[in-house]
């Protein structure tokens, strides 16, 4: 495998609603920041790939409009995934394995505020028997949480503690949206939203964007004093039918973690893309993290959850932390689909 | 045993709030006052009307606001003969790309005031504004473009804008 | 730098709009038989080569990718494998009054069907409870032919 490193990452602070900027206007500053910080000229980037979904803004081919922010001239080599930007990163990593290009720009954008995000996410379900009933993302997550509670895999208290810790840690992250210190007791006193989930178990609705530049070994070492290498990356998917899956397990995460080599060495911290509190428990266990491994120092998706952005942000947050010297080896995870249907695991290692 | 079901109707309805963004908001506010505002790219100096946020070739924000005139040149056009739902124009009518004087990218609009078969590349036109009280914050503030009476523009004056 | 000039949020124009898609979907032979079954007030599954019964049926065994075998009728009764209480139903969902989303494992099936339980109150819900399908009087061959499931007494 060719060595590939993350050399820069930029994100917009997530907000409940960006009243002012449309997608291209939001993307422009993060693209400029990521490219400028990479030390690689925009014209020298070999590949560009993005992740977003048109349903979020209700504009067909919005990802093509977004290219205005890139400046796709002279014509660039470009691709797009209708998925979280973490899968765009996977495509860029594969592209760099070909050996003929040495760098890539990866970005993601999502304005969840323009529509009804719970209804938008219903569109990813089986369109024959499930979507016509209109189950929303929170309800489906609640079904999954019930499975874990019934099996004793977690408790409502542990879920509240995950919520409290995430938003407390987010106080140190200027890009996070929900940043406050509210203890589990206070949270547990609140009513259910969709029982067994309370509002604190759910992610905020967020607008956001992020961008990253990756480079192959020699170039990465030339432009970065401490490039963060992708030591392993893999993604796996489970069956679409919710009743076909064991919602109390995440075999796709477990397999992706094995293939990415999570267990090969000590993990200093993990960034897990768990929009709902109980999903952190599932993913944490499936990743095989040692007890006590710090999880989501950024606050995670419970603090900011721009749809299609939050997964790539986990990888970017982990890379930025390693680049700053806060650890040598981290695991980042991204998810897609209802109830953790699809999972990507990325092992990052800082090498000076 | 009944027949197999062949198909189902699964209508989807999603409600959104569209926002115009900063630059287009300025454009729409001005067009209600009978003014056409564009933005100039600081890098390639091109003027975009309507503004597009970033310059799509340079990938930088178009910073300077530039007022352009409401006269221009038809660069290319088509004659619409096909009826469709919601159509308000009498067939046949002309849909044209109009390069406004002072702009570097033509914008699409209707051309009226002459027979469809008389419309031609290089035709000089002027905006026909909706009455001020009725002007919406949209491209419909201009009802259409119509001949200005000037001599046709030379091909060389718009060949880079086709 | 290339940041846009500031402007107060209130001065940016916005407009409501609605996207509607009038999709008509072909359902294929397996779902076609399942939906015809619902129209007849029956629930059909499909047997895999390994002998598992999938409800709702799939065209291929999700574990092996093999084509599935015969359609099999299962019971219209079963038990709740998981549930979530929807205290404020959203537009377009099966019931307008509070209900439970549920994964229901019907008797004779090895997988669960997502639908709703009309239980009145979350206090009446628990994992493992017995439920029975309530069908619409006028059925058209869609998943909505099943109005909901409703609780039934133990052993009933």
Image (cartoon, helix red, strand yellow):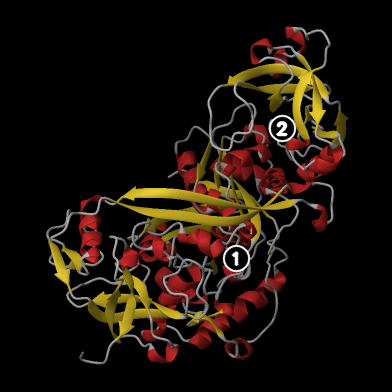
Eyeballing the image, is A344 above or below A34? below
Q: Locate the N terminus of chain A by quadrant.
A: top left
Residue, disc 2 = B58
Return the chain for callout 1. Answer: A
Return the chain for callout 2. Answer: B
Indicate left or right for C142 with C65 as reference.
right
The answer to whether residue C59 shows anywhere in this view is no
Which sits in the foreground, B28 or A79? B28
Residue B40 in picture, x, y percent from top left? 82, 32
Instruction: Specify few, some or many for label 2: CA neighbours under 10 Å numbering under 14, 14-19, or 20 or more.
Output: some
Element assignment for label 1? loop
Badge 2 and badge 1 both on one subunit: no
Kindly identify the residue that appears in the image at 63 percent across and 70 percent down: A303
Tag of residue A327: 1
Which sits in the foreground, A135 or A189? A135
Kindly identify the residue that appears in the image at 58 percent across and 31 percent down: A76
Residue B35 in picture, x, y percent from top left? 86, 34
Which sits in the foreground, B130 or A287? B130
Indicate left or right for C140 with A198 as reference.
left
Element assignment for label 2? loop
The answer to whether residue C14 shows anywhere in this view is yes
Eyeballing the image, is A10 above or below B100? below
């Amino acid at each position: 495998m060719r060595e590939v490193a993350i050399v820069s990452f930029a994100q917009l602070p997530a907000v409940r609603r960006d009243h002012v900027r449309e997608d291209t206007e939001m993307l422009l500053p993060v693209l400029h920041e990521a490219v400028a910080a990479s030390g690689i000229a925009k014209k020298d980037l070999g590949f560009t790939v993005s992740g977003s979904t048109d349903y979020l803004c209700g504009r067909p081919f919005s990802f093509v409009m977004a290219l205005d922010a890139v400046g796709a001239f002279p014509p660039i080599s470009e691709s797009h995934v209708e998925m979280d930007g973490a899968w765009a990163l996977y495509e860029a990593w594969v592209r760099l394995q070909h050996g003929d290009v040495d760098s890539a720009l990866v970005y993601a954008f999502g304005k969840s505020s323009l529509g009804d995000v719970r209804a938008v996410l219903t569109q990813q379900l089986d369109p024959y028997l499930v979507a016509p009933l209109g189950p929303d993302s929170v309800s489906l997550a609640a079904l999954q949480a019930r499975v874990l509670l019934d099996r004793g895999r977690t408790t409502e208290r542990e879920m509240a503690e995950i919520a409290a810790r995430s938003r407390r840690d987010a106080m140190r992250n200027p890009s996070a949206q929900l940043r406050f210190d509210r203890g589990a007791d206070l949270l547990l006193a609140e009513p259910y939203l969709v029982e067994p989930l309370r509002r604190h178990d759910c992610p905020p609705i967020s607008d956001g964007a992020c961008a990253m530049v990756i480079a192959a070994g020699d170039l990465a070492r030339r432009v970065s004093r401490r490039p963060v290498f992708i030591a392993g990356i893999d993604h796996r998917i489970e069956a679409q039918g919710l009743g076909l899956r064991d919602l109390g397990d995440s075999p796709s995460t477990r397999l992706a973690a094995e293939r990415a080599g999570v267990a090969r060495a000590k993990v200093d911290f993990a960034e897990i893309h768990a929009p709902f509190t109980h999903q952190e428990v599932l993913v944490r266990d499936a990743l095989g993290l040692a007890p006590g491994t710090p999880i989501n120092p950024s606050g995670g998706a419970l603090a900011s959850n721009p749809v299609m952005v939050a997964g790539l942000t986990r990888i970017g947050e982990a890379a930025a932390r390693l680049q700053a010297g806060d650890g040598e080896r981290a695991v980042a995870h991204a998810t897609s689909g209802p109830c953790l249907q699809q999972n990507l695991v990325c092992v990052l290692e800082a090498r000076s | 045993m009944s027949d197999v079901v062949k198909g189902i109707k699964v209508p989807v309805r999603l409600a959104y709030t569209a926002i115009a963004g900063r630059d287009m908001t300025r454009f729409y506010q001005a067009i209600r006052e009978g003014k056409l505002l564009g933005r100039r790219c600081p890098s390639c100096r091109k003027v975009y009307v309507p503004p597009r946020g970033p310059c799509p070739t340079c990938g930088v924000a178009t910073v300077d606001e530039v007022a352009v005139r409401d006269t221009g040149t038809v660069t290319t056009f088509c004659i619409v003969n096909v009826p469709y739902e919601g159509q308000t124009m009498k067939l046949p009518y002309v849909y044209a790309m109009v390069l406004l004087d002072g702009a570097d990218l033509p914008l699409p609009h209707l051309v009226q005031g002459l027979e469809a078969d008389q419309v031609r590349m290089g035709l000089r036109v002027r905006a026909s504004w909706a009455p001020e009280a009725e002007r919406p914050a949209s491209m419909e503030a201009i009802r259409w473009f119509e001949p200005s009476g000037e001599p046709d523009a030379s091909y060389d004056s718009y060949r880079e804008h086709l | 730098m290339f940041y846009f000039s500031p402007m107060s949020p209130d001065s940016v124009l916005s407009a409501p709009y609605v996207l509607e898609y009038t999709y008509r979907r072909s359902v294929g032979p397996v779902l076609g038989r399942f939906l015809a079954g619902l129209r007849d007030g029956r629930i059909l599954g499909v047997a895999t080569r390994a002998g598992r019964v999938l409800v709702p049926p799939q065209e291929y065994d999700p574990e092996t990718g093999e084509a599935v075998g015969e359609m099999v009728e299962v019971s219209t009764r079963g038990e709740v494998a998981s549930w979530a209480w929807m205290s404020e139903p959203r537009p377009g969902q099966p019931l307008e009054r509070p209900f439970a989303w549920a994964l229901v494992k019907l008797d004779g099936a090895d997988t669960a069907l997502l639908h709703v339980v009309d239980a009145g109150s979350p206090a009446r819900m628990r994992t493992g409870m017995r439920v029975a399908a309530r069908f619409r009087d006028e059925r058209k061959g869609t998943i909505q032919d099943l109005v909901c499931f409703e609780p039934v007494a133990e052993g009933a």
